[in-house]
Amino acid sequence: MFEFKFSDEQNMLRETVRDFTNNEIKPIASKIDQEGMIPKELIRKMAELGFLGISFPEEYGGGGFGEVGYCIMQEEIARGCMSTATFIGAHQSIGTNALFIGGTEEQKKKFIPPLAAGEKIAAFGLTEAQAGSDSFHLKTHAEVDGDEWVINGEKLWITNGGIADIISLFARTEKGITLFAVETDRPGFKAGPPEKKMGIRGSVTNALSFENVRVPKENLIGQEGRGFIYAMKTLDAGRLGLGAACLGVSKELLELSTKYAKERIQFDHPIAQFQAIQFMLAEMAVMIYNMESIVYRTAVDYDLHKDISRQSAMVKYYCSESLDKIVDYAVQIHGGMGYSQELPIERIYRDSRINRIFEGTNEIQKGIIARDIIKKSGRL
Ligand code: MYA
């Protein structure tokens, strides 16, 4: 018999993160949005609770909860604040995970513990002005000079770029795209001002420039020329975590919408009694059930070290498209109140839209899915 069931430990993790979100994140989520930053104090508290390295094995200072645990945590964090979920995702799921995926044993032992403990913050440096969807054609480059690599180039749209201590940086060398760990206190590194965005305003996004930035040879992560594969493998996990965050906020929206529909009286009846509203709630619930099913099925496979490239592209595509429909229904059900800044719905509406764009646009995800289907002659 196959049973879909979380362990006691996983349920406890969910409870812990949910309490934290209710007590520490929800009360300041609107402030985070308005002030365009996540308070250092909140980051410190999350670090203390082990949230910033929850997925990594304990031997590298992580929580040992794997991808399933990471997805549970991101679901609960996103219920309160998508800016905070984005900060965590950029730090843990792609920034640090790239070093974990590509690094040698020695490099993992060196770089992962301070990041998993949240003593240092990471960012993922792949995107450039002319290398967004076409990430393979990035131009940032690195040349050897004695015992060091010298890096030159510009990165764009880097989440956490302006607050990171370490960038997992993808640069071109003679042997192809290569991953480097670049500490941001090295001379020649500069972060531009935070971008002004439609949503996830508390998550900082910056352009970065590298002008003759020197790193020791040991900062070349894994094998020279293997960087693109490391980037793609990292994004496999990142896209899955993004799906989990979409799932969490969708659950929050369904709860808020149901509560409101039961309380709001029109034509002498709670609007929950009207079929037009019921159909929206039903569609939201169906999408959430589907999202939950694919997120955790894929997370289990990731923890079993299976290749999840197609599945995580499906998760990212389906969950972000569903969230957009769900948040739109939530606004509709709440009517004028859904459009007002008095409730969190308006902020969630703005925050949701990015999920169809970052970690690879949904058009790129469909391309990845289609290529795999064609390669396997239609067999899943
Ligand atoms: S990070 C930036 C995101 N950027 C992207 O996602 C870029 C999108 N582009 C691509 O994914 C690739 O360029 C595509 C590659 C797919 C188009 N595992 O021939 P190729 C190998 C292992 O397919 P291309 C961001 O936004 C492949 O076999 N290997 O290349 C973060 C081949 O190898 P070989 C793989 O045609 C924002 C080689 O690579 C994989 O150029 C912050 C080349 O491949 C793989 N998976 O197309 C986010 N794939 O040559 C924070 C390929 O040996 C999020 N290969 O045969 C936080 C969470 C959200 C919270 C929000 C609140 C709700």
Image (cartoon, rainbow, N blue to C red):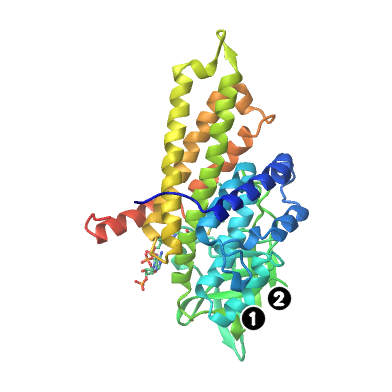
Other residues around mark 2 within 10 Å, as few (<14) / some (14–19) / many (≥20)? few
As drawn, the label of residue 318 is: none
Report the side of 355 relative to 24 (left or right): left
Of 377 and 171, nearer the camera is 377
Of 286 and 160, nearer the camera is 286
The answer to whether any part of residue 362 appears in the image is: no
Task: Kindly state the secondary structure of the residue where label 1 is placed.
Answer: strand
x and y, in percent, of residue 210 in the image:
64, 71
Which image quarter has ligand 1?
Answer: bottom left
Of 376 and 255, nearer the camera is 255
Determine the residue positioned at 48% across, 16% down. 274
Distance CA(mark 2)–CA(mark 1): 8 Å
x and y, in percent, of residue 129 in the image:
54, 60
As drawn, the label of residue 186 is: 2
The reply to whether the residue tagged 2 has its Cβ within 8 angstroms of ligand 1 is no
Tell me: residue 94, above or below residue 364.
Answer: below
Name the residue tied to disc 1.
Answer: 215
Displayed quadrant of residue 205: bottom right
Quarter that holds the C terminus: bottom left
Determine the residue positioned at 66% across, 27% down. 340
Residue at the bottom extreme? Answer: 146
Q: Amino acid at mark 1?
A: Val
Report the side of 307 relative to 193 (left or right): left
Q: Amino acid at mark 2?
A: Arg
The earlier-in-sequence mark between 2 and 1 is: 2
Other residues around mark 1 within 10 Å, as few (<14) / some (14–19) / many (≥20)? many
Tell me: residue 203, above or below residue 290.
Answer: below
Q: Are marks 2 and 1 in contact (CB under 8 Å)?
A: yes
